[in-house]
Amino acid sequence: MIPVAALEGIHTGRPAAVLGGGPSLRADFPRLPDHAVRLSVNQHGTRYGRCEFLVYLDSPNLHPSMLRLMLEFPGLRVGRDHWSQVDLSGAAWWQELFSSQLAAWLACFMGCEPVLLAGMDCYQGDQMYDDPDCENFNPTNAAYTLPLDMHLASWRKAFQKCPHPERIRAMSGPLASVFGDWQTKS
């Protein structure tokens, strides 16, 4: 098990992409910098190729595809259970509602800049996931029924919980109202 303190500042100045499971991921992904550190939120980002980190709060034991991924993921698994390869107890990490928030905190903790939130639609709209067959979707889960303003209020806590939250930018979607949006310079 790697102590989380060993990850502090290891990617200083390198962009990071926090890859959520929202339908905007399909359009956001091609715009990411090629050299960005990729943090998959649960299994979502791994559908698009190599990811260095798999960040999760959801229990892999409840989702067969995530459990399979735990066994074969080539990067570092970061969570709060026995599947995690990183011991989070050595830092005041952002313990909030969503796996994506832990991933954003980790990217900031590692010194990444900018930290780009991709595929983060806050479970709004007719299609909540990029993968319509996602087995994690449970319409009775409170996360999927929270009003948008509650999602945004939860994300605003990044400004108290993340190191250098000014580095965070949204690729698209509702989180641009919290962090501002990032435009590629191509």
Image: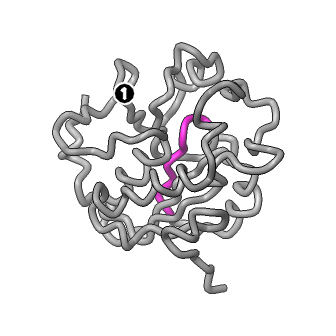
In the displayed structure image, the side of residue 102 where residue 87 appears, left or right: left
In which quadrant will I find the C terminus? bottom right
Whether 8 is drawn above or below 116: the answer is above
Residue 178 in percent (x, y) is at 50, 68
Identify the residue at horizontal 36%, vertical 27% (top origin). 84
Could you say which is closer to the camera, residue 171 or residue 110? Answer: 171
Tell me the kind of residue under disc 1.
Ser
Which residue of the protein is positioned furthest toward the bottom in this rendering?
Answer: 185
Identify the residue at horizontal 78%, vertical 50% (top origin). 125
Residue 154 in percent (x, y) is at 45, 51
Could you say which is closer to the camera, residue 69 or residue 26? Answer: 26
Query: Does the segment drawn in magenta span residue 41?
Result: yes
Magenta stretch mostly in which secondary structure?
strand
In which quadrant will I find the N terminus? top left
Q: Quadrant of residue 114?
A: bottom left
Which stretch is magenta? Answer: 36-43
Identify the residue at horizontal 59%, vertical 31% (top origin). 142
Kindly identify which residue carries mark 1.
84
Callout count: 1
Whether 126 is drawn above or below 173: the answer is above
In the displayed structure image, the side of residue 131 where residue 72 appears, left or right: left
Identify the residue at horizontal 66%, vertical 37% (top origin). 145
